[in-house]
Image (cartoon, coloured by chain):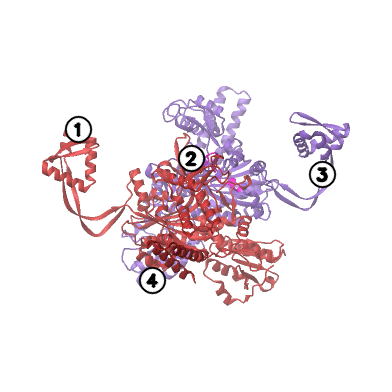
Chain colours: A red, B purple
Amino acid sequence: MDRDSLVAAVARQGAAVRELKKNGGAAADITAAVVELNALKAQLAAMAEPAGPVLNKKALEDLLLRKMFVVPSFEIYGGVGGFYDFGPPGAALKGNLLNAWRRHFLMEDDVLEIECTNIMPEVVLKTSGHVDRFTDLMAKCTKSGECYRADKLVEDFIENLLAKNASTLTAAEQEKHRLVATKAESLTPEEMHAVIKEYGILSPGHGAELSFPMPFNLMFKCHIGPEGTHVGYLRPETAQGIFLNFRRLLEYNAGKVPFGCAQIGNAFRNEIAPRNGLVRVREFQQAEIEWFVHPEDKSHAKFSLVADQVLTLFPKNLQLTTGKTVQMTVRDAVAQKIIANESLAYYLARTSAFVQTIGIDMERVRFRQHLDTEMAHYACDCWDLEIQLSSGWVECAGHADRSCYDLQVHAAKSKVEMVGTLKYDAPRAVDVVDIKVNKGKIGKAFKADMAFINKGLDALAADDAAAMAFEAALAANGTADLVVDGRTFGLARDMWSAKKVTKNVSEEKFVPSVIEPSFGVGRILTAVFEHTFYAREGDEKRGVMAFPPAIAPIKVAVLPLSTAKEFTPVMVSLEKELRSRGIAVKSDASSVAIGRKYARVDELGVPFGVTIDFETAVDQCVTVRERDSCAQMRVPLAKVPDYLDRLVRGSLSWADLAKEYKLIEAKKEE
Amino acid sequence: MDRDSLVAAVARQGAAVRELKKNGGAAADITAAVVELNALKAQLAAMAEPAGPVLNKKALEDLLLRKMFVVPSFEIYGGVGGFYDFGPPGAALKGNLLNAWRRHFLMEDDVLEIECTNIMPEVVLKTSGHVDRFTDLMAKCTKSGECYRADKLVEDFIENLLAKNASTLTAAEQEKHRLVATKAESLTPEEMHAVIKEYGILSPGHGAELSFPMPFNLMFKCHIGPEGTHVGYLRPETAQGIFLNFRRLLEYNAGKVPFGCAQIGNAFRNEIAPRNGLVRVREFQQAEIEWFVHPEDKSHAKFSLVADQVLTLFPKNLQLTTGKTVQMTVRDAVAQKIIANESLAYYLARTSAFVQTIGIDMERVRFRQHLDTEMAHYACDCWDLEIQLSSGWVECAGHADRSCYDLQVHAAKSKVEMVGTLKYDAPRAVDVVDIKVNKGKIGKAFKADMAFINKGLDALAADDAAAMAFEAALAANGTADLVVDGRTFGLARDMWSAKKVTKNVSEEKFVPSVIEPSFGVGRILTAVFEHTFYAREGDEKRGVMAFPPAIAPIKVAVLPLSTAKEFTPVMVSLEKELRSRGIAVKSDASSVAIGRKYARVDELGVPFGVTIDFETAVDQCVTVRERDSCAQMRVPLAKVPDYLDRLVRGSLSWADLAKEYKLIEAKKEE
């Protein structure tokens, strides 16, 4: 049975079991049906997540450390959990990746880019909700005082429980436990406490009782200025800086909405349990775009350009039912309201196209919608780009519709208006309530109580229905009672009046909604590492990083065949020629064999190698080698820089070049 | 009298005064001579710092804010001193500047680049000396509790004093006050207190007494992890991360010294008194290179390439005597030991070349050597790149010889060896002391005291002279006293012996010295802003940023003459063509006059403009305009992208293009 048939069989058998139970079937029949269902589910589970290519994780980790792609920070002092440095090839890879991101997302759509500070004063993050709500539940070991993230304790405990009791637990029991694990992240302290008690979870380090779980704020706190009274935080996301600058950005963009603004920069989260390399760290880099749109018109001008693209989607209803992803076009996903609007869908499509260009295996990519229970406090819809890594499916980018939450709260707190203006094509007739206040009369009547009166009148002015009701009372009785903070003031007919009028208005003010694609740069890099790493066939020890040329940290290796002095001038002039074109080069003039030199640059993911040999002086040619095929061509020295330039920039393909020069068969390199 | 003659006259008159005093000249004669000296000095002072071009600072600041080059962070909440955001053109300018820096310094010399974390654990910065010594003296207003930087209070007070009493103070008095101001930065708390008392300096805010000055650490402190016990700091410089990675970097570089490693990133200093825009901020960006060299061989392989370059130097002896800079070749500066070594000199020369390419006026650039009293705790020689800004001469980059301070302290604290290896061309005969220890005998004799004994023997092993003296004592008496921590142990002849032997050694280990060019990115940007800003002749209101094309945030403006629909396809295809080449474009299809469009893009420093007009449909040509000359040419549309590409990359000059196409005279644009 293939996978899809199996899914259908599970669904049918599940329906049969429910039918039996509902109709009061015999216990033996129900048991038999459930056994059958479990057997089908087990078959499906074995198939469900087609395992990606086998990854030799130890070999990859060894390479990444040895070649200084990523190294633990403060390593000579034993390191600190959740902090990593990028060594030379890692930093270059990251830089190239971000430049590719800029060209793909920003230049293409005229998105602005700004750079804000890492430290922010408390008022910003209090207003955004992070001071109160950016927390994880923490449970303390009552013996050692060590702190643990409570949801992770529960998840780990249940994973372990399921693994150990796979044969004895019924499918329904397994399902029940799994649901607890899935929901662990969104439990209240009380609920979490109950779960910990119910499962009897103890501290992993000492097997001791755990404290009552308490919220722990994930922001790093500091003090600004010498007085020690001004609290600041390291930003937990780059987005806030963009919201704060909204007004100026809108002006910079000549007042036009929609428009986007991006920021690439550090964010900081004082994780309770950093783990999994770059996946959960305390200091990381984000690349975020805030795309501002009219809240009632989230269409996208370039939607038609991506509408036919096919995405692998994992909507929330499927997560809770079949557990299966679905492939569909962007157009269908929006038409069927699976993705809420064009702008959100546009960015899912663009993200999908982006990760493909940086070497991610699209078979291991899906977009998962957040369950209602896991949504961040500011979001109304959210789709994660998930990439399958050796540790499972990992969120590498989020795509959230933050609605107008952030602009609204900052505007309210700062008293700075943050709105866009929609100019109508033609003036529109709009019903409005026109209020007239006789300040002189009111002033004379209420003198000392004017603060109350003004508050009451402001409330009426802000609520059309209330104003018209007050008008009706005045019209009927000649007076009406204005109640403010428990006090009552009798207003007379000649002090205040309201009437409905129709006005022609030519524009409206609105608080824009925000569509936010947000990339975790370290996670994307981890995916690139895992999806591009492989070992040469027949030689497990020869690792290769198959970075696409656009993001490879070093583009060309210049490799003299030996230490013979005659090779030096050719090497130096080739280096110079390539560098003048901005191409990163690495030479290896050491005495090791050429096969060993290739092996070294393969580990760095250098896409093209140039070998200078004794023939070069004779034929003025060098050998150019392509990393993944190991195929070689003999190319005139004079033409090599230009060819390499074009190969690296993608305007010439290896196959095209092979039409011009004879391909030398790949042979075993030693 | 020209400036140089005046300097000589001052020197001669000064000598005459000293001569008179020394020889007990008549009071009247001395007074007359001093008056003459003061008059000469006053003349010189008026000439001494030739004022740069007049800068309309208000107009520049208005432009920078309005066009979002730099805006105060958290502006809607009133801002916080010392924090600035870079808006779209500012961020792009900075990005381009850093890429130019990378190509100039890193690619050219094969310098590695890494990226480390902003948060560092206490042990790193305690070891580096920053926890104890990275402080400013702070004085508190005894009335309001406001904190002030004590040295700035003194400097401001004296500046004010000198300005107010210019006519009444003698030159000698002025000199004395100036010296106090110059040295204020390096005073101890007691000395600072004395100065504040002597001058009667009060708090600027309330005119109240100031507290005794206390050292205030400029690092932002935070806590890592949930327990709240693990102290961390935001790095005050990017350099430390490089030192921590030294061992891996050396290995990455195949063990070869010299080599360099760079880092571009944020640094944080909790300034007591942030001021002067981007010049003194609390969060800023550094671009630092650590160039590791053999401590006894600081020559540089590429020195000959810069030796003829002429630098404007301001060595410490001239600062304390003539106050005059001197121009000399790099070769002479090293030969005359004005600059301590080739590596340091190489980087001064490279920095000088770099700032020239980014639009800095070289007439307002000098390299000032640190006085012995102002050197950072880790440095043994230091030269600042100073650029004359409207606020005076400002340090924009430092070039420090940090000796081996950092590697040494980190190696000692972490117990990780951080050394390079120098392989000799031929083995060298070296005298060494060979020590033999009879552990069995010693063990039996001292059992419980072995910790003391080992400590004592280690000390002998580390000190050849002490070892040979101990050997002499054993040889003479058969026993010798080993004194450890106040306790004495009698060692016998058969327990320990030492002798001098000659060994052939083929290599040596050494702790590298570090030459560090360190750029303050925000300060460099400030200099670029001030040195490139000007107003169009005859129109004070039309500001222009004359950024060189390489760093201009936007390279090309595409400007349809009007809103006529026929211009749109030309504009769109030109935009697309240019963007596909990675060229940043800005279009303006609004209805304002073309002169106004030019004015807008001039403010953004866009070097080239392309106007599409009604003729374009007829002749398939567009008008290309150069920003600073306002000169225009009519160029075929098909050729424009390629020309612009080359103009922007600098492989084609405007003058060269003008040979091919008729130059249209610059005319007044409205």
- The Cα atoms of the two marked residues, 1 and 4, are separated by 75 Å
Marks 3 and 1 share the same chain: no
The first of marks 2 and 1 along the sequence is 2
- Residue underneath mark 1: A447
Q: Which mark is residue B620?
A: 4
Q: Chain of mark 1?
A: A
Pick the front one: B9 or A46: A46
Residue A36 seen in the figure: yes
> Is disc 3 placed on a helix, strand or loop?
strand
Tell me which corner region of the image, top left, top right, bottom left or bottom right, holds residue B236: top right
Residue B103 seen in the figure: no
Amino acid found under the numbered disc labelled 2: Cys
- The Cα atoms of the two marked residues, 2 and 4, are separated by 61 Å
Q: Which mark is residue B431?
A: 3
Q: Position of residue B633 (x, y in %)?
A: 41, 65
> Is disc 2 placed on a helix, strand or loop?
strand
The first of marks 3 and 4 along the sequence is 3
Part of the protein shown in magenta: B226-242
Amino acid found under the numbered disc labelled 3: Asp
Q: Is residue B617 left or right of residue A386?
A: left
Residue B232 magenta-drawn?
Answer: yes
